[in-house]
Image: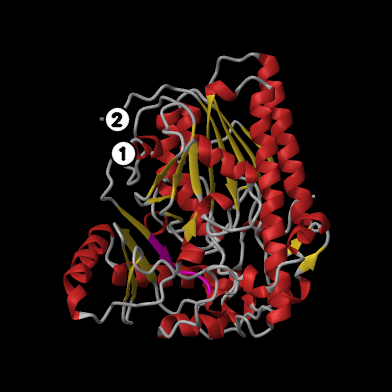
Amino acid sequence: MVDQVEPQNLLFILSDEHNRKVAGCYGHPFVKTPHIDRLAAEGTLFSSAYCNSPICVPARASLATGRYVHQIGCWDNALPYRGEPESWHHMARAGGADVVAIGKLHYRGGDDYGFTEELLPLHVVEGRGDLKGLFRKSQLPNRGTAGLAASAGRGDSSYSRYDARIAAMAEEWLARRAAEGSDKPFVLFVSFVMPHFPLIAPEAYYDLYAGYGLDELSYRLTAPASDHPAVRRMLDYFDYDKHFDDEKRAIALRAYYGMVTRLDELVGDVIAALGATGLADSTRVIYTSDHGDNLGNRGMWGKSVMYEDAVGIPLIAAGAGIPAGRTLDTPVSLIDIAPSVLDATGLPANPDLPGASLIELAQGAAPDRVVFAEYHAAGSETGQFMVRKRNWKYVVYVGERPQLFDLDADPDELNDLWDSAEHAPVLAELQAELEAICDPAAVNARAFRDQQARIDEFGGLRGIEKTVDIPFTPAPN
C-alpha cells in the first residue's frame, strides 16, 4: 500500500560526476560528506541508482524529459536538449508551480526549457557543444588525459568559484521566497558542477586528504583493465591512465575527494537555508548526480562506460511520505525524477513517461523493476546498452559479446558471467527486457545517422577539426 502524497515544494540538488562510492552514507571509510549523510539518515538512500547515459548532455536531457536518450535523440555532447519534448520543468510550470533553475543545465541555451527563472545558467559552448566527440571512431586523433593529469591538485578553479555563487544565490532565493510569503508551490533546481574535472580542489579541502596514501585513496577502485574489446577500444581512444603514475593518481584522488567534501558543504548550506527560512517542513529534498567517474579504476578516468563507477549515481530523497533512515536496493534512474517532481508537487502523473515516482518507490512499490542506460558518444565504436534487474546487470555492445554481472556476489564487477551455461536463462531474461525497451541494432544505426548529419552540418571532418577542443565547458562569468 502506497500512502497518499501531500503536495509540497521541492528542492532538487544535482551535482556533476559524483561517484556514489565516494560518500560516507554509501560506505566510504573516510571521505567527509556529513551533510549528504545527514540527508540520507533523514530520508531514503537508493543504493542501486543510475544515470541513463554516462556523459553530461545526454544524461541531463533524459533527466529533463523523463525519457530515454533514444527517444529524444540527444545522443552526445553535440546534440543538446532544445526544449522539446517537454520537460518536467514545463509540466510543473504549467501546473502552477514556480520552477527555478540555478546553475549548470548543459542544454543548447536560448530556448524555453520550462523555467520561470533561469539563474547563472551554464549551457553547451556556443549552442553546439563538443563537435569533435561526434567522431566516435578513428577519424580524429585520440583524446588523451595529459591535461587532466597535469592540472590535478590543490588550487583555485572556476568551477569551485561557480559552485559557491550557485549556493549563495540559492540561499538568497530561498530567503526572498520566505519573505514574500507566497502560497504558490515551487521547485528549486540547484545544479552544481563539482566534482567534475578539472581535478582541482581548494587547498583546505585537498589537505583534508593529504595524509592518505594511494592504497587508502583507491578504496574499491583497484579493478584491472577490462578485457572486453569495446572497452579496450575506449581505453585506446581516450589514452586513459597513460599520464597517471601512482603519484599523480594519488594527487588526483585527493583533489576529487576534496571537491566532494566542498560540494557536500555547499549542499549543506542550501539545505540549512530551508530551515533558516522556515521552508523545511513544506519542502521535500532530492540529491543526485548526472553520472559518476571512473577515478582511475580499470585504468579509466571520466565516464563513458557501463561499469558502476561511471553509470552508477548517488540518489537520496527526504521529506513528507518518504521513509527515514531507509536504504532501498530497488533499481532507479534519472528518468524517475520527472514523475517524482509531479508526484511531490501534487500534479497529475504523465502516463507517457517510462519512469516512476521515487516517493512511491521509497514506500516499497515495484521492487522488481528494470532500469536502462545507453551510450552513443565519444570513443564508442558501437552503441552500449545496459539493463539492471534485481541483482543482475547486463550490458550489450552491438556487434560484440555482452557482459553479465551478479552485483550481489560481485559488486566490483570482476567476474563476467556472459559465457556461463548456468546463467543462460538469466541472459535470455535480460535480453528480453532490453528488447522490450528498444531494438539495440536499430537504435545504434539511428544514432550514427543523426551524428553524421550533425557532422555534415558543420562542414564534415575538415570543418570540425578546426574547431576548439572542449575538455570541459567553462563556467559562466
> Which portion, as a residue range, is magenta?
373-378
Quadrant in which the N terminus is drawn = top left
Q: Up-down: is 179 above or below 420?
A: above
Which residue position is annotated with label 2? Answer: 2
Asked whether residue 240 is drawn in magenta, I would say no
The residue type indicated by label 2 comes to: Val
Badges 1 and 2: C-beta atoms under 8 Å apart?
Answer: yes
The residue type indicated by label 1 comes to: Gly
Circle 1 crowding by C-alpha within 10 Å: few under 14, some 14–19, many from 20: some
Q: Position of residue 40 (x, y in %)?
A: 52, 41
Q: Position of residue 367 (x, y in %)?
A: 28, 46
Which residue position is annotated with label 1? Answer: 364
Report the Cα–Cα distance between label 1 and label 2: 7 Å
Q: Up-down: is 37 above or below 141?
A: above
Residue in the image at 47% along x and 48% along y: 63
Tag of residue 315: none
Residue in the image at 68% along x and 62% along y: 256
